[in-house]
Every structure is written in C-alpha cells, then in structure tokens.
Image: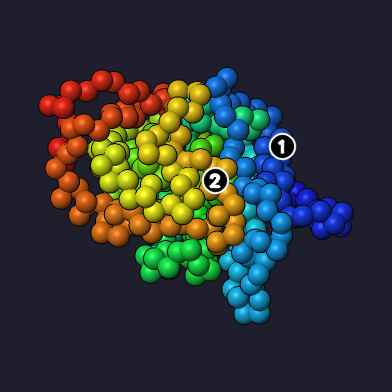
Amino acid sequence: MLPVFRQMLRQLRAGRRFSLDVLLDAADDHMHQLETVVPPGSGALPRTPFESGLPRERMALTKIRGADRLRVARRVLPILAHMRLGANLYGTAAPARRSEASAADIDELVDRARRLGAKDIAFVRVPPDAIFAGKSIPHPYAIVFTVEMEKEPIDSAPSLECQLEVMDGYKDLTTIASALAGFLRQRGFSAFPGTALGGTTDYPHLAELAGLGAIGYHGLLIAPEGGARLRISTIYTNIANLPLRESNEHAWVRDFCAMCRKCVRSCPVEAIFDAPAERGNGGRQCIDHGRCRDYFTEHYGCAICVKVCPFSQVGYERVRERFRGNPTAPRFDIGSDGRVAIPVVEPSEGVRA
C-alpha cells in the first residue's frame, strides 16, 4: 500500500488530527527506494508547511455535506490513485538505455504533453537550492509543465467551486506526469514524476527558470498561456541534452506587478508583501505564509490573488499590449543559477513592452 495511505490510517487510528504535511512527507518516502539521488544545496529552504493549526471545526472542507462531499471525493480519489501510480515508478526503475534525446523525441514529448492537456512545457537543470531542505530528486534535469484552471470557477473565489477547480488541476497534473514518465521510459530514458501537490522542489521557481513565465508579486507563475490561473508539476529525467532556454522573456511581468499591486491590496489578511523580500538564500519571497495559511484553510483555499490578477482576467497578451513600462520598478533579474539579482537600473533603462 502506498505510504500516504498507511500514514492516513495511522493518524485516524491514533485519533490524531488530519495533517496534510504528514501525508506529503510520507508520500516523499518513495525517494528512498533509489540508489542515488540529488541532494539539496547548502542554502536550500524547507517546503512551506500546509498545516495551519486551526481546529477541525474551522476548516472549510470539514463543513461540506452530502453531494458536495461526493464532488470532492471524485477529485481526491483520482489524485491519490495517480500519486500511487507515480510512486510505484520509483520502485520499478529499469536501467536507462539512453541519456540523450533526439529532436524528434523532444517534439513527440511536447506534442504528447499538449494532447494530454498540458498548457505549456519546458525544461530546466534544477539548481540545488530549488530542492527543499531534507528532500531530494532522482535526476538533476526536470521537465516542467502547466495546466490551466478555468476562469469561471476561479472568479468565484473563495468558494467550494473554486477549490474543486483547483483539485481538477492537481488531478490533471498527476495524470499527465504519470503518462509522460511512462512514455519516456518506453523510449529508454529514466523518468520519475514529481508529486503534484507539495513536491520536493519549488515548482514556480523551476517554471520561471525554464522560461515558462515569471513569478508575480502573489508568488504565482504568470505565463502567456493561462496567465496566473496555472498549476505546475515536474518529471525528473536523465536526459542530459534537454533544450534549455538561455533567457527569460517574461521578466517584464514583475515591472508590471511593481506598478499594479492589485493582489497586495485585495488580500484579506495582508499576506502579500508590497515588494518581494529576501528569503535568506539569495532568492526572494512574496508571501507571509503564516498570515496566508489560516485564511486559506478556512476559505476553501482562498485564491483571491489568482482571481484579481489582471493576467487572470484579461490575459497575458492583453496586459503586454497595454503596458508601456515602469521605469522606476526594481529589476528582479532571473538568473540561470536560481538566484535573483537586483541591479541598480536607471529610469532610462526601463522595460518597454
């Protein structure tokens, strides 16, 4: 039985409160089945915990009844089933026959991902500090892909309808990750799906480094396809010649964020910083997670910042067409080493979109 299910049963039998963090840590145990792994860097930070500390009666999902419980179960069960399928791949790793992919291999992978429902897909060499402290990954290369959440349910945030749409996103991620990992293995490569929820690496960070988009002030990836209404997952692989992007054309997004700040003003608990702050490892942090967690737990995962983001409402291209630059914005450069440098920029060097 998958460790996550065993851990769930232990919690229930012991009469302890449900803890998503404990379950995700148990799900990460499948990494121990591998002989070699890539460890985190010395500056790696731990994964942000989901546990809010609220009593059970204040958690939104504990209040739903009847048909709504069934609607939740119809999302959760497929997620857990595909998590189990993905975890099983860690115990059935056949020796890889290949470590370099042809252009045709990559084209077929991208085409298959899109046909399965991925909104976009790109590739990255994972910087060690993007691996969460105490975790590890099977290979230093990752395939990063996104799925889009529908606008109408997200516009109802915070609500059960919105949370169900988020769950659908995670369900799609698990399905796509398992299918693509299986496809690569059939082609002779080593491939392991990341866990859609939680994971052992910082997914928005990897997606930004891969060139899929840029992280906005709300801490979420903003990309041409889907705006901020995206979920992200990964597949770790031994393919050493993935077509890595050398630059990121989306850095202007944070210039817009520095001017907009709609998510900052709209957050009901003021959990979004007025400007990204130092994380302590050379990176930046946008969210006060302690302030966010309780409201998130009490209000169906909240998602107000996703809803109000102009990139969610009118789309990436419309925002870019209208934006004429923000010369006074701080320049958060996206580095290939995973760190964010902030050089002094004169107003005349402001980005023009």
Q: Which mark is residue 33?
A: 1
The colouring scheme, among rainbow, by chain, secondary structure or one colour, is: rainbow
Residue occupying the point 14% across, 42% down? 324
Q: Nearer the viewer, residue 345 or 38?
A: 345
Query: What's the amino acid at mark 2?
Result: Arg
Residue 42, x across and y down, in percent: 57, 19
- Element marked by disc 2: helix
Is residue 203 found left or right of 104 in the rendered image? right
Local packing at callout 2 (Cα closer than 10 Å; few below 14, some 14-19, many 20+) is some
What residue is shown with label 2?
Answer: 291
The picture quadrant where one finds residue 41 is top right
Which of 262/196 is in front? 262
Instruction: Compute the Cα span from label 2 to label 1.
Output: 37 Å
- Which residue is at 58% across, 66% downward? 75
Query: Is residue 73 visible to the viewer in this orientation of the structure?
Result: no
Query: If the image is split into quadrants, where does the C terminus sit?
Result: top left
Q: At 67% from the left edge and 37% from the top edge, which residue is drawn?
A: 31
Lower position in the chain sequence, tag 2 or tag 1: 1
Residue 165 placement, left or right of 224: right
User: Which of these two is toward me, 118 or 257?
Assistant: 257
Q: Secondary structure at mark 1?
A: helix
Q: Look at 32% across and 23% down and name the residue there.
A: 342
| Picture quarter with the N terminus | bottom right
Few, some or many residues within 10 Å of mark 1 (<14, 14–19, 20+): some
Above or below — where is 310 with respect to 274?
A: below
Is the residue under label 1 in contact with that under label 2 (CB below 8 Å)?
Answer: no
